[in-house]
Amino acid sequence: MTDLNEPEAKLEALLDIINSSARQAIAEYKNTGHGVPSADATTFHPLDSATDTIALKKAIRLLEGAYHQLSTILAPPQHTVMNFVFNYNWACIDVALRARIADVLDKHPEGLNVDRLAEAVNLDKSKTARVLRALSLMGCFKEVERDVFANTRLSLILKSTNNTGCLAGLHSQDVPKYAGVLYESMIDEEFAHSHEPDKAPWVLALRKEGMKGNNHWELFKNNDEKREAFQRAMLGLNEMVGASAVLHHYPWDNISSVVDIGSGIGTFSTPLAKMFPHLKITNQDLPQVLLQAQNVWKKTAPEALLDGRVEFVPFNFLEDVPVTGKDVYYLRNIIHNWPDRDATTILRNIRKVMGPNSRVLIHDCVFFHTLQEPDIGTDGLSTAPEPMLPNFGAGAHRSYQMDMTMWLIHNTKERTLSELKILGASVGLVLTQVYDLVETMVVEFRIAQG
């Protein structure tokens, strides 16, 4: 038996994981009947927009975690640490998004000379070329000839019509400013030990610019453009993490009614209604949000409205209780937006109206640590094979960056399974099941007995 305490044995084991996970990913692509994607592709692969890619995501989680761990071991530490810092991809992405470079190149699939491209987007040609070459290193755009650039499968995400590109734009334009005051917020007397939303780093960043702000949600209240961009970004977030996998991996056939708490415009409940027409669905959110939602439903799922399978009930989840006695109360990207006090309030309001067979589903990123924990792996959370870090290391990169985003914007966090258990127990709920969707988890709670 291989002794994984030996350094060279660890390297060989990581190489085996890289090889096997890459082959699994290749098999998932080939199973579609469309082959594997090409680095030079100028169109999306059918699997890129599939709603259930759990098997692919599990393979990529292993692949990303193992190859990064291998590189970290073998590369000089100076090299690796400076790679963390020498990363201006976000700034180059911001240029490409705001100049709509991918939109221009979409009209020229064979490529466009940087002279004409820079003229089309009203930017300096040499600086535009430098931005594109930096991104081309990562496979985002391609220099097909000297000074001639074309889109790739990655740069198509940066088109103005792409929701994930919209999410990237919100991050590249605003979040770096908030990150720039992170340390300052950790030593500032007013901010350092507060976990209140009005003490998030973004508030401090605004103050430094002579502006005021206390609640990030206020930015969207009276600004239709920002609100629409945020809604599109949330669609992009759900696409990035593969949130629609919950439609395929939860036993919806065994229930009859669902309440979508903080439903927004119906990103979750609309496809749910289409896939499971037997369900009675209640959308609950603020009144102005539900007005928008009804217009969206009329366009995207009119049959559900005509059949009376969906209703819209306005409420404020921090102040009101939802509708009574439904089978499932579903919260996606809700609990992570709020500190423990408010998260407990939301769950307590739901607990008040639950029936004996009701369930609460919290659909968020769920953390576990880089050290092996005794209960992890027994509740439905996967753990990585040795010698990888138990939480998949860099394979969980986006989840940990999402946690930082929650901190910078809301002064909140993604939670561990233990933290979610504590929240549930505080209102009389007990964890009964975890569904590992790779980038996110669905954590099921029921009423605690006794």
Image (cartoon, rainbow, N blue to C red):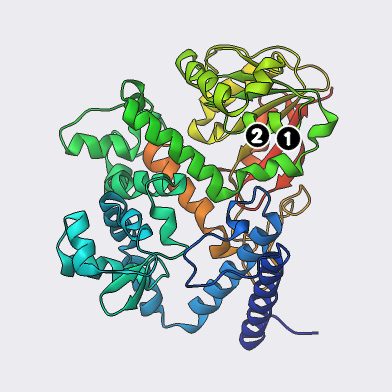
Vertical arrangement, residue 348 with respect to residue 416, above or below = above
Q: Nearer the viewer, residue 50 or 345?
A: 50
Q: Residues within 10 Å of mark 2 (few under 14, many from 20)?
A: some
Residue at 34% from the left image edge and 25% from the top image edge: 224
Q: Is residue 186 left or right of residue 436?
A: left
Tell me the residue that label 2 is attached to.
271
Q: Nearer the viewer, residue 271 or 318?
A: 271
Disc 2 marks a residue whose amino acid type is Pro
Res 194 seen here: no
Q: CA distance from mark 1 to mark 2?
A: 6 Å
Q: Position of residue 121 (x, y in %)?
A: 21, 55
State the residue at coordinates (34%, 67%).
135
Of residues 239 and 43, the one drawn nearer to the viewer in this rendering: 43
Looking at the image, residue 68 sits to the left or right of residue 145; the answer is: right
Instruction: Tell me if mark 1 has few (under 14), some (14-19) or many (20+) residues whose alpha carbon lies within 10 angstroms of its own.
Output: few
At 34% across and 24% down in the image, what residue appears? 218
* Quadrant in which the C terminus is drawn: top right
Q: Position of residue 229 (x, y in %)?
A: 38, 36
Q: Is label 1 in contact with label 2 (beta carbons under 8 Å)? A: yes
Q: Is residue 347 above or below residue 2?
A: above
Residue, disc 1: 275
Q: Which image quarter: residue 232?
A: top left
Q: In the structure shown, which secondary structural element does the residue marked by tag 2 occupy? A: helix
Q: Quadrant of residue 137?
A: bottom left
Left or right position of 248 against 120: right
**Residue 404: percent from left, percent from top:** 43, 48
